[in-house]
Amino acid sequence: MDILLVDDDPIVILLQKKLMEKAGISHQIISFNNGEEVLEFFEKKDSGNKYLMFLDINMPGLSGWEVLDELESIEIPFELRVIIITSSIEDSDRLKAKSYERVVDFWVKPFSLQDFANLKTEFNL
């Protein structure tokens, strides 16, 4: 399973990578600065691949919500699970995230080493 990080803040991406490293998660990590880049990445992928995507919902250009909407509107030939990452503490965002089949969790920034240790256990990473 490859791990995809989608966030417009390079500091958040760096923090996620460091915390994954400290938690012992050694899967390939691919990062994207916006929603458009990750959608282009998916256009080139074949069946059989598995991805866990950390998706920021508040980004310039395509928001995380728009990325999810686009992924819902097309048929993708691979397994994709999404963890929403956000600084939003709004219940409406948490409820909206539950409406997407691929969303498996909702994390509020900042993250901790324990978050990634739990992730390693939950997804057998």
Image (cartoon, rainbow, N blue to C red):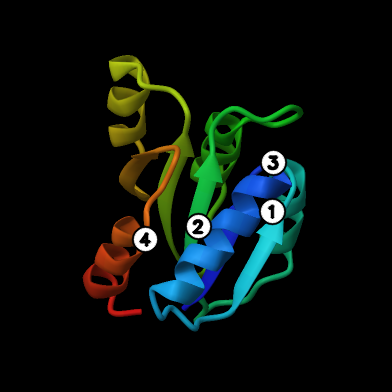
Q: What element carries label 1?
A: helix
Neighbour tally class for label 4: few under 14, some 14-19, many 20 plus, Cα within 10 Å? some
Q: How far apart are marks 4 and 2 (CA)?
A: 18 Å
Dots 1, 3 in contact, CB < 8 A: no
Find residue 85 and report its horizontal and vertical position in percent.
46, 41
Find residue 59 and report its horizontal and vertical position in percent.
67, 30
Neighbour tally class for label 1: few under 14, some 14-19, many 20 plus, Cα within 10 Å? some
Describe residue 46's horizontal placement relative to residue 109 as left or right.
right
Mark 1 or 3: in front is 3
Dots 3, 2 in contact, CB < 8 A: no
Which is more N-terminal, label 3 or label 4? 3
Q: How far apart are marks 2 and 1 (CA)?
A: 10 Å
Find residue 74 and report its horizontal and vertical position in percent.
57, 48
Mark 1 or 4: in front is 4
Q: How far apart are marks 1 and 4 (CA)?
A: 25 Å
Find residue 71 and report its horizontal and vertical position in percent.
55, 46
User: Residue tagged by mark 2?
Assistant: 53
Q: Residue 113, which numbered label?
A: 4
Describe residue 107's horizontal placement relative to residue 1 as left or right.
left
Q: Which of 67 and 85 is in front in this view?
A: 85
Mark 4 or 2: in front is 4
Q: Residue 48, which numbered label?
A: none
User: Residue tagged by mark 3?
Assistant: 9
Q: Which residue is drawn at 43% across and 78% down?
A: 25
Q: What element carries label 3?
A: loop
Question: Where is the C terminus found, in terms of image quarters?
Answer: bottom left
Q: Is mark 4 on a helix, strand or loop?
A: helix
Amino acid at pointer 1 = Val
Which is more N-terminal, label 4 or label 1? 1
Q: Is mark 2 on a helix, strand or loop?
A: strand
Amino acid at pointer 3 = Asp
Which is more N-terminal, label 2 or label 4? 2
